[in-house]
């Protein structure tokens, strides 16, 4: 009986010790978790300069708009640097990004840094910055709007194909690949191009402090080097991100020692097409094939 009692007492003691070790382990794991969370939260809320990269063809991008909204609301993001390397894209894509940058600029400084190329719609995006930097050899400008079409009716006739369109009015669905463009349709398209171009020119005049006449002269579609753009008032200074940081420090007191954090654009799960593009890359040609509507694009 004594042996059994001692054994029972020993088992109870062992259980208590195991329970104490389990409790200690849980407390330790919880402590590590809290420490990691605190560290992550501290890093996440650390003062920094945000950086948005705008590369390739510019189109409407709701995920990028949402990301810029987060930057605007983030008090730890003291400024936004927009790095641009783009020939442009759709007019609406560039216009939308421009206005989103101006929303951010209402709360914190925004600096545009043009790299190799920032033309047409790419330059429109740069206008969203409070200051524009570019390299001396940067290609920029190309301020204009274009709509392109092709008349395939001659080719189709040669191979024995006849097309016919039944529409409510003659100006419906013009321009079309399957019918010659009439003078009336051409005049309509030109009026749309002129109106969109007028809006672009007004944006240049307003953001660059140029007279309407001077803005129109510079908005005839020509390209400029960064050095030429500077002499014509289209950019503010020659330089890159380092010069942009120096300007932020001098103008807004944002220390150059603050880290730069890339703006994360949450695109979710990619579909099969997106995964193929990621594996093999997108060619500029394939991107241009997907552009719809009016485009503001430099096409060498």
Image (tube, rainbow, N blue to C red):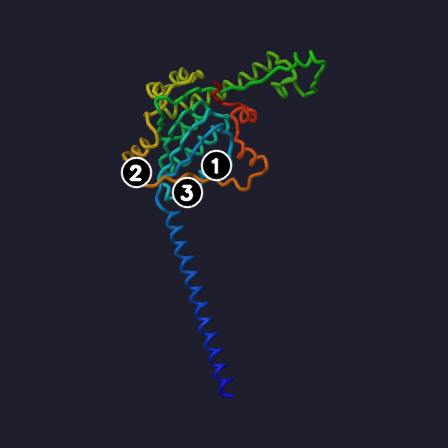
Left/right placement of residue 123 relative to residue 61 reads left
Mark 3 near mark 2, Cβ–Cβ under 8 Å?
A: no
Residue shown at the point (43%, 39%) measured from the top left: 263
Label number found at residue 273: none
The residue pinned by badge 2 equals: 256
Which one is earlier in the sequence, the residue at label 3 or at label 1?
A: 1
The residue pinned by badge 1 equals: 64
The residue pinned by badge 3 equals: 73
In this orientation, which residue lies closer to the viewer: 11 or 28?
Answer: 11
Residue shown at the point (58%, 38%) measured from the top left: 271
Residue shown at the point (40%, 54%) measured from the top left: 36
Find residue 90 and report its horizontal and vertical position in percent. Answer: 51, 26
Q: Crowding at label 1, few (<14), some or many (≥20) Cα neighbours within 10 Å?
A: some
Mark 1 near mark 2, Cβ–Cβ under 8 Å?
A: no
Real-space Cα separation, disc 1 to disc 2, in angstroms: 26 Å
In this orientation, which residue lies closer to the viewer: 13 or 174?
Answer: 13
In this orientation, which residue lies closer to the viewer: 5 or 300?
Answer: 5
Real-space Cα separation, disc 3 to disc 1, in angstroms: 14 Å
Secondary-structure class at tag 2: loop
Residue reaching furthest to the front: 3
Q: Crowding at label 2, few (<14), some or many (≥20) Cα neighbours within 10 Å?
A: some
Find residue 186 and report its horizontal and vertical position in percent. Answer: 57, 14
Secondary-structure class at tag 3: helix
Dividing the picture into quarters, in which one does residue 122 lie?
top left
Q: Looking at the image, is mark 3 or mark 1 nearer the viewer?
A: 1
């Amino acid at each position: 009986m004594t042996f059994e009692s001692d054994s029972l007492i020993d088992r109870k003691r062992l259980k208590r010790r195991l329970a104490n070790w389990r409790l200690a382990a849980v407390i330790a794991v919880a402590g590590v978790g809290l420490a990691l969370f605190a560290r992550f939260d501290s890093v996440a809320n650390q003062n920094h300069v945000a950086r948005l990269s705008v590369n390739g063809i510019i189109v409407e991008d709701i995920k990028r708009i949402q990301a810029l909204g987060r930057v605007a609301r983030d008090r730890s993001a003291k400024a936004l640097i927009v790095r641009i390397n783009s020939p442009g894209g759709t007019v609406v894509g560039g216009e939308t990004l421009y206005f989103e940058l101006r929303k951010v600029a209402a709360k914190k400084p925004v600096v545009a840094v043009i790299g190799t190329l920032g033309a047409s719609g790419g330059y429109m995006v740069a206008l969203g910055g409070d200051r524009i930097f570019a390299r001396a050899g940067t290609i920029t400008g190309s301020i204009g709007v274009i709509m392109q079409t092709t008349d395939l009716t001659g080719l189709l006739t040669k191979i024995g194909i006849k097309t016919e369109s039944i529409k409510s009015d003659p100006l419906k669905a013009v321009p079309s690949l399957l019918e010659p463009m009439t003078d009336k349709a051409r005049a309509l398209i030109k009026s749309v191009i002129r109106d969109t171009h007028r809006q672009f020119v007004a944006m240049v005049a307003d953001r660059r402090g140029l007279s309407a006449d001077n803005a129109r002269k510079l908005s005839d579609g020509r390209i400029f080097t960064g050095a030429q753009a500077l002499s014509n008032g289209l950019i503010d200074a020659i330089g890159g991100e380092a010069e942009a940081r120096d300007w932020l420090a001098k103008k807004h007191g944002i220390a150059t020692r603050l880290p730069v954090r890339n703006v994360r654009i949450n695109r979710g799960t990619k579909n099969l097409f997106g995964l193929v593009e990621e594996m093999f890359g997108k060619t500029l040609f394939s991107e241009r094939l997907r552009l719809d509507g009016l485009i503001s694009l430099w096409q060498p």
